[in-house]
């Protein structure tokens, strides 16, 4: 199994190839749509594995707050998942890169990290937000994701025990692994 581990300001940063629905962390992040419906991709898998508790909690939030703007995040229980909570965030749809996509993607990661710390959670796992149905090129998305997490951890030392990226394919794992080499020293 592909796995890489490093440390940033007292937090373990892990890249691993695998299925996010199987991760034993306090919160997993969902690459949601603004209506918080199951949809396909990682979202469909998380709603399936989590069961009605996840889908119904998401529907209630949708009803109360309306559509979730790109870059924002909300929390539901994890239902039948090993993770206690799901943090749902909406990444940007790729439109060529000049429509604010990098800033919106960074905001999505940051919103999840802020919510996790607010709730006192210590371990969180992310999928590769926006790089499936939303079409964000994975090399570029990986760099934004890792830079954002690195910056957050430096600004909030010791707040989180582990941040894990769970990449569904080996090429995606390799893209994140290579992006970390570009980002880590900066
Ligand atoms: N574990 C980890 N990663 C996964 C899993 C899994 N079980 N399944 C898929 N991925 P996508 P987006 C990867 O399309 O681009 C949904 O329909 C996948 O290989 O899930 O943000 C929503 O409802 C890819 O690398 O999310 C939205 O409408 C990554 O997860 C829309 O898709 C993200 O792909 C969101 O699109």
Image (spheres, grey):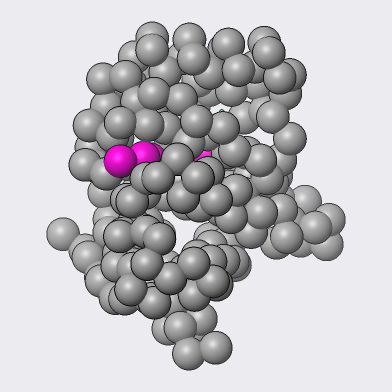
Q: Foreground: 162 or 70?
A: 162
Using the rendered image of the protein, determine whether residue 59 is visible from the camera's viewpoint.
Answer: yes
Magenta part, dominant SS:
strand
Using the rendered image of the protein, determine whether residue 19 is visible from the camera's viewpoint.
Answer: no
Residue extending farthest to the right is 99
Height in image: 125 above or below 183?
Answer: above
Give percent across and percent down for residue 31: 52, 38
Q: Residue at left 55%, top 88%?
A: 186
Which quadrant does the N terminus fall into?
bottom left
Give percent across and percent down for residue 75: 50, 30
**Numbered marks: total:** 0
Q: Foreground: 125 or 114?
A: 114
Height in image: 21 above or below 174?
Answer: above
The answer to which image quadrant residue 67 occupies is: top right
The answer to which image quadrant residue 133 occupies is: top right
Q: Is residue 12 magenta?
A: no
Give percent across and percent down for residue 79: 32, 19
Q: Residue at left 62%, top 30%?
A: 33
Residue extending farthest to the left is 1
Q: Residue at left 37%, top 45%?
A: 121
Give percent across and percent down for residue 5: 25, 71
Q: Foreground: 56 or 141?
A: 56
Q: Which residues are magenta?
A: 26-31
């Amino acid at each position: 199994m592909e796995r890489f581990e490093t440390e940033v300001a007292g937090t373990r940063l892990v890249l691993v190839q695998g299925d996010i629905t199987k991760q034993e962390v306090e919160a997993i992040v969902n690459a949601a749509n603004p209506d918080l419906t199951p949809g396909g991709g990682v979202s469909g898998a998380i709603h399936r594995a989590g069961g009605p508790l996840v889908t119904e909690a998401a529907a209630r939030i949708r009803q109360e707050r309306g559509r979730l703007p790109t870059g924002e995040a909300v929390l539901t229980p994890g239902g039948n998942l090993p993770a206690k909570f799901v943090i749902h965030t909406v990444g940007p749809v790729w439109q060529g890169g000049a429509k604010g996509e990098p800033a919106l993607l960074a905001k999505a990661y940051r919103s999840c990290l802020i919510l996790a710390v607010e709730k006192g959670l210590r371990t969180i796992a992310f999928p590769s937000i926006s790089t499936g149905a939303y079409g964000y090129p994975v090399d570029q998305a990986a760099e934004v994701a890792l830079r954002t997490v690195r910056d957050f951890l430096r600004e909030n030392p010791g707040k989180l025990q582990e941040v894990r990226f769970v990449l569904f394919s080996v090429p995606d794992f390799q893209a994140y692994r290579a992006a970390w080499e570009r980002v880590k020293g900066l």
